């Protein structure tokens, strides 16, 4: 099945409150980078992913950062606190942008703003940002080459694009992975690690880092599944309990898809050449 940007936007608009209510009230929803195979601290692992991307990109106080697919805005809030960088978040989901703006008002993050819009038609002038970042979002863009063109356009010459994203390591996807990974979040198709690099190079980027993080995504879903089962065992809300148990079961199916090479995760850092046309 091929999903459209509207399908993706509708899905995340409809599920935002579910995730906030049943899962994480601050909207932390991305994959974790774990300290060891025995690490079960999801929140610390999720924060470690953000720290890793920020470090690899060299984000500092003078940086102007665009977060594409920013969701609820957590990465930008963390960057503002830890580096003092100025940031803009862009997301297809109006619900998540609304949540991010509300949190911004509560936190008082003066150097952060959020825009509702598409990665394939960004509302920014060329060469606006020193850095573009993204966490587990660009896989959902149906027209991925167009999103790469837009990111290249809004980056300043010499600017860095640092991101994590889900991978499709092989072309053929079984029914289990299709149901629990791809169709579940309105994901049509993706790149393998090599294909991603080829696509980025085709858009004009210089590849600095491309690394598979398969073990970390498998651990993420193992930990999330156990967290969901633990929470289900202590809740009196039948609807919440059923949702958590269904999510836990889905996490198990996702682990199988990862082990069979149907689902992966990677980190990339690429650069727009100094002498590049916008």
Image (cartoon, rainbow, N blue to C red):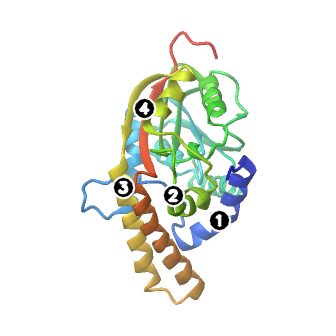
Residue 174 is tagged as 2
Query: Which quadrant of the figure has residue 225?
Result: bottom left
Q: Where 226 sits versus 153, above or below? A: below
Q: Where 232 sits versus 134, above or below? A: below
Q: Of circles 1 and 2, which is in front?
A: 2
Q: Looking at the image, which residue sits at the far bottom? A: 236
Q: Position of residue 72 (x, y in %)?
A: 59, 54
The residue that disc 1 covers is 15
At mark 4, the secondary structure is helix
Q: Of circles 4 and 1, which is in front?
A: 1
Viewer can see residue 219: yes
Asked if the residues shown at circle 3 and circle 4 are in contact, with their CB atoms under 8 angstroms apart, the answer is no
Q: Position of residue 34 (x, y in %)?
A: 31, 54
The residue that disc 3 covers is 45
Name the residue at 27% across, 53% down: 35
At mark 1, the secondary structure is helix
At mark 3, the secondary structure is helix
Q: Is 205 or 187 nearer to us in this picture?
A: 187
Q: Earlier in the sequence, mark 1 or mark 2?
A: 1
Asked if the residues shown at circle 3 and circle 1 are in contact, with their CB atoms under 8 angstroms apart, the answer is no
């Amino acid at each position: 099945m091929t999903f459209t940007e509207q399908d993706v936007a509708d899905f995340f608009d409809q599920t935002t409150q579910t995730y906030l209510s049943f899962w994480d009230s601050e909207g932390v929803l991305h994959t974790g980078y774990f300290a060891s195979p025995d690490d079960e601290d999801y929140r610390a692992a999720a924060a470690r992913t953000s720290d890793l991307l920020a470090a690899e990109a060299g984000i500092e106080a003078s940086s102007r950062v665009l977060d594409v697919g920013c969701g609820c805005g957590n990465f930008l809030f963390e960057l503002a606190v830890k580096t003092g960088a100025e940031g803009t978040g862009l997301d297809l989901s109006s619900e998540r942008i609304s949540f991010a703006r509300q949190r911004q008002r509560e936190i008082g993050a003066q150097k952060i703003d959020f825009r509702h819009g598409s990665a394939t038609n960004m509302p920014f002038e060329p060469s606006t940002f020193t850095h573009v970042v993204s966490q587990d979002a660009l896989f959902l863009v149906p027209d991925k080459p167009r999103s790469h063109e837009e990111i290249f356009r809004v980056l300043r010459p010499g600017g860095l694009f640092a991101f994590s994203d889900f991978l499709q390591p092989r072309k053929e996807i079984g029914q289990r992975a299709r149901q629990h990974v791809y169709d579940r979040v309105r994901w049509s198709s993706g790149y393998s690690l090599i294909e991603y690099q080829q696509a980025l190079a085709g858009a004009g980027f210089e590849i600095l880092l491309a690394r598979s993080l398969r073990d970390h995504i498998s651990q993420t879903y193992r930990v999330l599944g156990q967290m969901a089962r633990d929470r289900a065992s202590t809740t009196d809300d039948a609807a919440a309990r059923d949702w958590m148990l269904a999510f836990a079961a889905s996490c198990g199916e996702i682990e199988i898809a990862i082990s069979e090479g149907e689902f992966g995760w990677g980190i990339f850092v690429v650069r727009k050449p100094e002498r590049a046309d916008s």
